Amino acid sequence: QVQLVESGGGLVQAGGALRLSCAVSGSIFSINSMGWFRQAPGKQRELVAVITSGTSTNYADSVKGRFTISRDNAKRTVYLQMNSLKPEDTAVYYCNADIRPSISSGRREVWGQGTLVTISS
């Protein structure tokens, strides 16, 4: 069974930094795009950043210049380096991957369990 295992959340003060990691576990044929989403209390889940298999990236306007998404294909891991954190970055952060489980299967999305990021003012 394919799973996304997240780590790196926690509590930091405003202006601080955190690095989130998300590793794909289980047998798969390929990984296409990988990304991070977040959901703050009372709000809808929103895209934070995405990186394609060709390492092109896209960011939400609210995090541009502060967050950096990267991936290590050998480790099947995606990272989110978050700098200059603000209280409004507080949310549960979810990892997402567009995978192809086997050579004969179609693509599907997989989600991580979420990791809580809390920024104190």
Image (cartoon, rainbow, N blue to C red):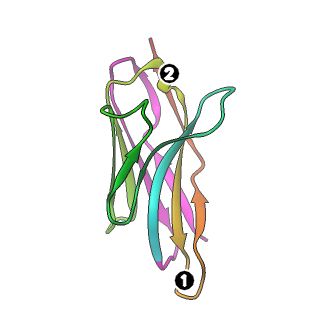
Please provide the residue range marked out in magenta: 1-29
What residue is drawn where x is 55% and y is 77%? 101
Which quadrant holds the N terminus?
bottom right
Secondary structure under badge 1? loop
Q: List x then y, in percent, for residue 54.
A: 33, 65
Identify which residue, 74 or 100, lies in the foreground: 100
Q: List x then y, in percent, for residue 50.
A: 43, 51
Sequence-wise, which precedes: disc 1 or disc 2? Answer: 2
What residue is drawn where x is 47% and y is 18%? 87
Q: Which residue is mark 1?
A: 102
Secondary structure under badge 2? helix
- Measured along the vertical axis of the image, is residue 14 above or below residue 51? above
Q: CA distance from mark 1 to mark 2?
A: 39 Å
What residue is drawn where x is 45% and y is 69%? 31
Q: Which residue is mark 2?
A: 88
Q: List x then y, in percent, for residue 81.
A: 33, 40
Q: Is residue 3 left or right of residue 50?
A: right
How many residues crowd mark 2 within 10 Å: few (<14), some (14–19), many (20+)?
Answer: few
